[in-house]
Amino acid sequence: EDQVTQSPEALRLQEGESSSLNCSYTVSGLRGLFWYRQDPGKGPEFLFTLYSAGEEKEKERLKATLTKKESFLHITAPKPEDSATYLCAVTGTASKLTFGTGTRLQVTL
Amino acid sequence: ETGVTQTPRHLVMGMTNKKSLKCEQHLGHNAMYWYKQSAKKPLELMFVYNFKEQTENNSVPSRFSPECPNSSHLFLHLHTLQPEDSALYLCASSQQPGVEQYFGPGTRLTVT
């Protein structure tokens, strides 16, 4: 059974204080790892897909990386508007997404 | 309208009521999904449709009944729900199963 574990559960940063979120996974035949952002009371917003170990993707202050066991979402010089819950999901040979419980990020002034 | 839309955004229903949730996607995708999101839990996949055909039912109680009349529309019919069914219900779509999914804003359901 595919599994995704995200850490930390919650993270509080000051504006400009860079950090990383972790997503550890076990999956049968990785076909993709996905990162989403979810604001309170809204649906998840797609950020990135990573397909193979060593791959990296960037968008503004976010950079996602992938190894054979985990993925990191690096947040560089975050701003208050980056506050959200970040979700990680994987898909393997079963072709369905398995989600983690997310990391709740709060960025303060 | 763009992306994935869901109506209603909020729903309060009694345990004996019957209601339906509606989802529409404007992305030209072939697969659609229903998820349940409860506090402190990962998203729970409920149903999967691919080209209008149901391909997955994740042991969902029969009080939840999906309907997919075409690749753009998805419904979730609700009847005799329980208070523990209160949650955020999310619809998503993707080009095909196993690739990135795009989510709607969700319906916040409260069962009293």
Image: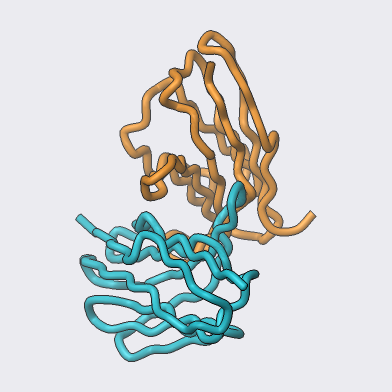
Q: Position of residue B112 (x, y in %)?
A: 53, 16
For this rendering, which residue is in front, B96 or B109? B109
- Above or below for A64 versus A11: below
For this rendering, which residue is in front, A80 or A74? A80
Query: Count of labels shown?
Result: 0
Q: How is the image coloured?
A: by chain
- Which residue, as the protein is rendered here, is positioned at the far top? B16
Q: Position of residue B44 (x, y in %)?
A: 39, 44
Q: Position of residue A77 (x, y in %)?
A: 55, 85
- Above or below for A74 versus A100: below
Q: Residue at x 49, y 34 (%)?
A: B87
Left or right: residue B91 compared with residue B38: right
Residue B71 can be seen, yes or no: no
Left or right: residue A37 compared with residue A19: right
The quarter in which the N terminus of chain B is drawn is bottom right
Q: Position of residue B54 (x, y in %)?
A: 44, 41
Left or right: residue A93 compared with residue B52: left
Q: Residue at x 41, y 25 (%)?
A: B84
For this rendering, which residue is in front, A100 or B97? A100
For this rendering, which residue is in front, B77 or B31? B77
Q: Residue at x 25, y 68 (%)?
A: A25
For residue B57, which quarter of the picture?
top left
Specify the chain shown as cyan: A
Residue B19 can be seen, yes or no: yes
Specify the chain shown as orange: B
Q: Residue at x 54, y 72 (%)?
A: A47
- Which residue, as the protein is rendered here, is positioned at the far right? B1
